[in-house]
Structure formats: C-alpha cells, structure tokens
Amino acid sequence: MKSSPSTATHPLALLAVDGLLSDEERAIRDTVRAAADRELRPHVAGWFEKGEIPARELARTLGELGVLGMHLEGYGCAGTSAVAYGLACMELEAVDSGLRSLVSVQGSLAMYAIWKYGSEEQKQRWLPGMAAGEYIGCFGLTEPDAGSDPGAMRTNAKRDGSDWILNGTKMWITNGSVADVAVVWARTEEGVRGFLVPAGTPGFSAPEITMKLSLRASVTAELVLEDVRLPADAMLPEARGLSGPLGCLNEARFGIVFGALGAARDCLETAISYAKDRTVFARPLASYQLTQQKLADMSVELGKGMLLALHLGRLKDAGELTPEQISVGKLNNVREAIAIARECRTILGANGITLEYPVLRHANNLESVLTYEGTSEVHSLVIGKALTGEQAFR
C-alpha cells in the first residue's frame, strides 16, 4: 500500500524562524507581504519586460504602506525597529529587487542622509513628503570612474561668494530621472561634502539609463552637473568627509542583507511548487532524489541566511552592529541568494527562463545586487582587514 505524503514544511519553518520574531515584527511583515502581493506582484513581470515602472504611483503606494524611511524617527516616519525594516525589505524583494531598491534608496540613502546629516530646515522641507511618497529622492555617489573607490570621485564643489558651484557626473543612480531631490556628494577644499540638488536646478540633468538586463523594474539614471549653482544652505551641515556617504551605504547594505533572502525565498517557493506539480516519467519531479537534494541544500542556505540577518538586525537594534558585520551579511546572503535563484531555474527547466515564473528575473536582478552597495570583492576585503588588521585595498 502506498503511504500518503506528509504535510510539506516551508523552508523557513525548518528552523522555526517565526518564533524568533515579535508579534509586531510578524504583523509588519505580513502587512507588507499582503500589500506587495496585492498591489505589486500582479504587475511586476510586465514592468520588467517593458523596462518601465510607474515610479510616482509606486512611491505614493509605498508611502501609504509606511515603508519609506520606516526605520527613521520623526518627520512622518514610523520609527520601527531595524528587524522590522529588514523584514519589509525581504517582502518587497520577494516581489522584485527593483522595488526594494526604490525603498532602500529613498529611505536608507536619500532620507537617511538628510535625517542624519541635514539641518532642521532641510529635514522639515523634505522628509515628511518623502515619507509619504510625495517626493522621490536619489543618492549621487558612484561615478563612471569611481565605483568601489568613492575617494577617487571627480565631482567637485567650489565656493562662489556665498554660493556653491557643482560640476561632475554620477552614474548608476536609482530613482535619478524621477527624483525631486538628489543628494550629491562632491569634493571641496574642506573634503567631501553632501549637497541637496532639487530637480529643475539649472545645469542639473538626469538622463535615464536604458537597455538594462537587470533591475528592469527600476529607474536608473546618470546625474550630470554643469556649473550647478546652489545656495549655502543646500549643503548638509553635519556630513564631513567620506564617513558621511559611507554611513548611508551601511544603512542600505543592511536592508540588502534581508532583501536578497526575499528573492531567494520566492525562487525556492516557486521551485518547490513547480516540482510537486510537474510530472516526469509518471512521477512528480519533487519525488526524485536529485530534486530533493537541490531543495534541501537551498533550504539550508536560506535558513542560515535568515538566522544571520536576524542576528545582525538584533545587533543593529542594540546599537552594536559594525560595518564588517554588515559586510558578512551582504556578502553571504546575496551570494547564496543568487546561487539559489540559478539552481531553482534548473528545476523549472525551460519554463524557468520565462517571465511566467520569477526565478530568472530574480537571478538577473541579483547580479546587480551582488555589485551595488559594495561588490563581493570589496566586502571580502573589509572582512579580511577585520581579521588580519592589514589593508588590502591598495
């Protein structure tokens, strides 16, 4: 007599992850998941295929959901825990990395820069509208010849009376062409400083980058500054040197530690469902040992990544998280997420290359996530320096 199959276990249930979350954290996660499934998931494959998103509409939707700058205090922000913010990032990236990128750049880069380093006037001017999704922000640090080495930036700001004149180019800027305000980092005689550049400022333009094979459901642009004149109060007064933009990057990297797992989880859930429904040689694909080996290995890595993310989140909420610990999380979780996405594609076979299923879309997106906010090589060297005390960047 054939035995009846036992009830299937969700990959994250193997390690009882839900029991490590508070009631509030689970409620926030579930709220974001439900909204993302209802408002975003039905459209994301079409956005990816077209390479276009309704950025303004999305910003308002995400603002109403309360995820823009949700981990910041005051100015219309929810002031949630770091873990709750990470869980929201995970649910958004389970739909698409581009959507989580919009939220990360808005909240952890542009808004955080103003919240952390801005004047009270700057905070009042921008943060409430950005939290509501009425204003969109972007973060201009990376340049065509200065990605992993921001200290090599060429964008400069020079004084002209009480004003500043900015010249330079920034590259690969999420939200750039739709942003109402750009946080631009430039070299000055006093070191690197941050400036708020409103859209429409003479000499400032943001041409969109097209023909992408990754993050297609996301706006990516170049920022061009040609003799852009800004008043003195456009400078972020509390940011001096590279510690300013690097502090913002650590905020964004933290969200990626959780977010990448969302993409991996979505791929794994899809592969398990597909393998159970797909019949091969008169048996479910899920019943074969090779398939179960793949699913087991991926579930172990997803669970380990989730435990790591939660541990880092607890450290962050306790004010104890270090940059090298963030590097451990970003390096491991993105690396494992892209491996999971690629392996899931093999389970789906030829169906895995279509937009009917999310796995190759996630894999393509994770190629960008692997690179931005610090490449795997850079994070490896950050960890290496922590372990040896030796600087290997130069």
Image: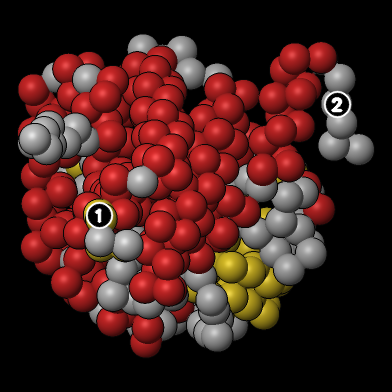
- The mark total stands at 2
Rendered location of residue 5, percent (x, y): 12, 37
Q: Is residue 3 above or below residue 145?
A: above
Residue 331 left/right relative to 383: left
Quadrant location, the C terminus:
top right
Name the image quarter holding residue 102: bottom left
**Kind of residue indicated by mark 2:** Gln
First-in-chain label (1 vs 2): 1
Name the image quarter holding residue 385: top right
User: How packed is label 1: few (under 14 Cα within 10 Å), some, or many (20 or more)?
Assistant: some
Rendered location of residue 172, percent (x, y): 59, 68
Rendered location of residue 242, percent (x, y): 68, 40
Residue at x-position 71% and y-position 56%: 147
Residue at x-position 55% and y-position 85%: 211
Res. 47 visible in picture: yes
| 1 vs 2, front mark | 1
What secondary structure is found at the residue carrying circle 2?
loop
Q: Which residue is mark 2?
A: 391
User: How packed is label 2: few (under 14 Cα within 10 Å), some, or many (20 or more)?
Assistant: few
Q: Is residue 15 above or below residue 256?
A: above
Residue at x-position 29% and y-position 48%: 286
Q: Is residue 211 above or below residue 308?
A: below
Residue at x-position 59% and y-position 31%: 327
**Kind of residue indicated by mark 1:** Pro
Q: Which residue is mark 1?
A: 284
Q: Nearer the viewer, residue 185 or 143?
A: 143
Disc 1 versus disc 2: distance between alpha carbons? Answer: 52 Å
Res. 103 visible in picture: no
Quadrant location, the N terminus:
top left
Q: Nearer the viewer, residue 21 or 57?
A: 21
Residue 19 left/right relative to 112: left
